[in-house]
Structures are given as structure tokens and as C-alpha cells.
Image: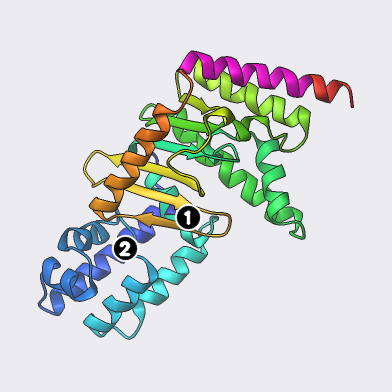
Amino acid sequence: MARSKQQDAWEFFGELLKERREAAGLSQGELGRRVFVSGAYIGLFEQGIRKPQRDVAQRIDEVLQTGGIFERTWRKLIDKSPYASYFSAVAELEGVATRICEFAPTVVPGLLQTAEYARAVTVAMHPFATEEFIEEKVTSRIDRAAILRGTTRPEYWVVLHENAVLTPVGGSSAMAAALDHIAELIRARWVLVTVIPRAAGAHSVMEGSLRLMEFEDQPPTAYTETAFSGTLLDDPAVVKQAQRAYDLLRIATLPPEASLTLIESAAEDHRRCASTT
């Protein structure tokens, strides 16, 4: 997979962290204890694999007495990302994940969106934004989906709620095209998508979306998101709870073939609505 400037920059962050830590005579474990993360995570920071949260960068500055250099560097790297600050680390992790499992209750996940669908979602969230801003957001979202077409693409499992299939985001014509796109990915066996029918009632994740990511040489993570914020979860016990919640979601879904039939049927319904307006 091609390296990005962001990856190089975070590796520089890690090299600087290692240099300052060793100059202070601290092991990874000792520094980790002082900033309230594990020594293993300090190692991942130093390799540029994981990115610390802002409060961790601040505590590193305090412990190593670096005058705020790590927080300032963190801010610069986050500001250069095309994503919201709380999602930037998630977007980077997607690129090295071996498996991604996602639940979307109301909106088609970004990795499955068409440009027209992504534009409609972005404009709805930012009604006064410039065209340049909208295009940047749409382009970054579509570019992320390239990981599904690469030779090292992750296994991608998606649980959609039926609400996400029936809501005509961008209008009926755009929604039909969005569902056609999902059906094509399913038939190409690039993704596995199942649908929770509305008739299923309550389910294990009633608020926001959920994403699980697994890696070849890193601990798994969970990510939860609501309309205005997201949280990347590293704690093994919390990740285990999230994995169990996802397992319960999958129990509530239609089988894959029935889910594909529902998606294609909904696409036809949206198309008919578009033709009558």
C-alpha cells in the first residue's frame, strides 16, 4: 500500500518521542505509566502505528518537559487531515486493518457511499459551506473507499439498518444509484452486507454507529460515532463488549441473500419514485 505524507509525519512524531524518552532515561513502560497508557502503546506511538489523543500528547510534554512540542506537533498533523479531528486516526487505521466490521443505523457508511450520496450527506451537515469545502469532503470520502479495491483489501462486514436503505438521501434517483453500487460490491464479493429489518425492533446498539477494526500486528479497536463526535476505543475490555454487541446485531439481520434482495428491491422502489416526480 502506498505511503501517505500523514504516515511519514506521524513516524517523525514517533521518532521524536523515542529520542526524548530515551534522553529522559525512561523505558516505554515507565513513560506509559506516567501518562496513563500501556508501554505497548508508547511503542506503537513511536512506530507511527497509533496516534495519541491530545490529552496524552499533553501529558507526554509534561512528563518529558518538552515545552509543549508534542501537543503542537499533534495539532499541526490533525489540522492537515481532511477529516474531523475525532475521525482522523480512524481513517489512518482503516488503511492497515485486516478486517472492518461496521454497523450503520441511519446512513450508508462512508466506504460504501457514491459521490452523489456523499455530497448530499455533506451538504446536509454543512448547509452554509463553500463549494470547495464540500468537494474536499466528498473527495476524501470517496478516496477512502479505494482500500476496498486494493490487493490487500480488508474483509469488510457491514450491518445496515433498514432505515439506511429506505431513506432517500440525495433524492430517489441518487438513492437508487447508491443502493445499486452496494449491490455491485456485494456481488463482486468485496463486501458482505446484511440488513436489520425495522420489524426486528430493539437491537444491541441503539445509539450511533459502531465500527470494529482488526490488524495483523496490533490489538483490535472499536469506534463509536454520533452526529457530532466520535470515540476511538482501545481498552481490551471495552472492545470485547463492542464485539459482543456486534455479534448480537448480526443475529438480528436477514441472511446475506435476503439482504441483497431487500437492497435491490429498495433500489427499484427508489427508481420508480424518481420516475414519477
Percent from the top left, x then y, of residue 70? 34, 74
User: Is there a contact, CB below 8 Å, between mark 2 and mark 1?
Assistant: no
Q: Nearer the viewer, mark 2 or mark 1?
A: 1
Where is 164 relative to 6, above or below? above
Horizontal arrangement in the rendering, residue 116 relative to residue 71 (left or right): right
| Residue drawn at 47 percent across, 64 percent down | 78
> Is any part of residue 96 visible from this angle?
no
Task: Tell me which corner region of the image, top left, top right, bottom left or bottom right, holds residue 265.
Answer: top right
For the record, the magenta segment spans 256-271
Percent from the top left, x then y, of residue 116? 70, 36
Q: Secondary structure at mark 1?
A: helix
How is colour applied across the structure in the image? rainbow
Task: Tell me which corner region of the image, top left, top right, bottom left or bottom right, holds residue 18.
Answer: bottom left
Badge 1 crowding class, 10 Å Cα cut-off, few under 14, some 14 to 19, many 20 or more, is some
Q: Which residue is mark 2?
A: 12
Percent from the top left, x then y, of residue 163? 62, 34
- Residue 63 sits inside the magenta stretch: no
Q: Quadrant of the C terminus?
A: top right
Q: Which residue is mark 1?
A: 87
Q: Quadrant of the N terminus?
A: top left
Percent from the top left, x then y, of residue 92? 41, 49
Mark-to-mark CA distance, 2 and 1: 21 Å
Where is 99 relative to 136, above or below? above
